[in-house]
Image (cartoon, rainbow, N blue to C red):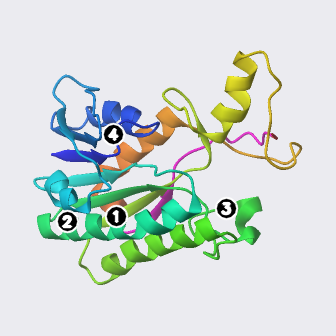
Amino acid sequence: MQTILGSGGAIGVPLARELNKYTQQIRLVSRNPKKVNETDELLPIDVNDLTRIDKAIAGSEVVYVTIGFEYRLSVWQKIWPPFMHAVIEACKTHHAKLVFFDNVYMYSKSAIPHMTEDSPIQPPSKKGEIRKQLHEMIMNEVGKNNLTALIARSADFYGPETKNSVFSLMVAENLLKGKKARAFGDVNKIHTYTYTPDAAKATALLGNTNDAYNQVWHVPTTKEQITG
């Protein structure tokens, strides 16, 4: 069984499609999960209820965390650490591998021109501090040989089923409405976006590759250097 926590989002949906190439046993977990593949098992729970996390993970070989909580600092501070703790403990209990789909908020500003998996972790924001904490929670357990896990990191993304990304909200939706596109920061700066089907394909491949575990990976983006 391979389980997706946060199965209805921009990454969870294409990830379920990709996982179907590896297994017919896929469990989709969210408030209102919907089948992506005919054989999907649906488990409707509110993941904010941490007492349900163990049930969601029980019987899983691999657990993918693709959930995105409300984009507010206070929500992240309150929910992310205890949620990740519950996920880690359940994975340890049920001997499940963990794949965390992450962002790049925890990296130092100095990493921006040439960001790699080895870039220094020195977050310039409070949200980045939370992502650093999650990174450390996972990798500390990996270092103690208590957990088999990997972290797959993505830039801002765009693509099908993507409703809440910066690109979708500020560019695509505005253009579709005949409005001007908007952007954060200097539009003349290079800014790379990740295509969600590419991110999902990479994450599924990583999750089903034994020697990919216990390290950090960046999912692919275009090689072209495109400005905003």
Residue hosting label 1: 83
Residue at figure coordinates x 70%, y 71% from the top left: 124
Q: CA distance from mark 3 to mark 1?
A: 28 Å
Task: Tell me if I can see residue 106 in this picture.
Answer: no
Residue hosting label 3: 115
The answer to whether the residues at label 1 and label 2 have Cβ atoms under 8 Å apart is no
Q: Is residue 9 left or right of residue 3?
A: right
- Relative vertical location of residue 202 with respect to residue 89 in this rendering, above or below: above
- Relative vertical location of residue 140 with respect to residue 70 in this rendering, above or below: below
Q: Nearer the viewer, mark 3 or mark 1?
A: 1
Mark 4 nearby-residue class (10 Å; few <14, some 14–19, many ≥20):
many
**What amino acid is at disc 3?**
Met
Q: Nearer the viewer, mark 3 or mark 4?
A: 4
Q: Give how far across and how far down residue 179 sits, in percent.
A: 80, 21
- Relative vertical location of residue 38 with respect to residue 202 in this rendering, above or below: above
Q: Find the magenta span and give its range.
A: 214-226
The answer to whether the residues at label 3 and label 1 have Cβ atoms under 8 Å apart is no
Residue hosting label 4: 7
Q: Which badge, 3 or 4, is on the more N-terminal residue? A: 4
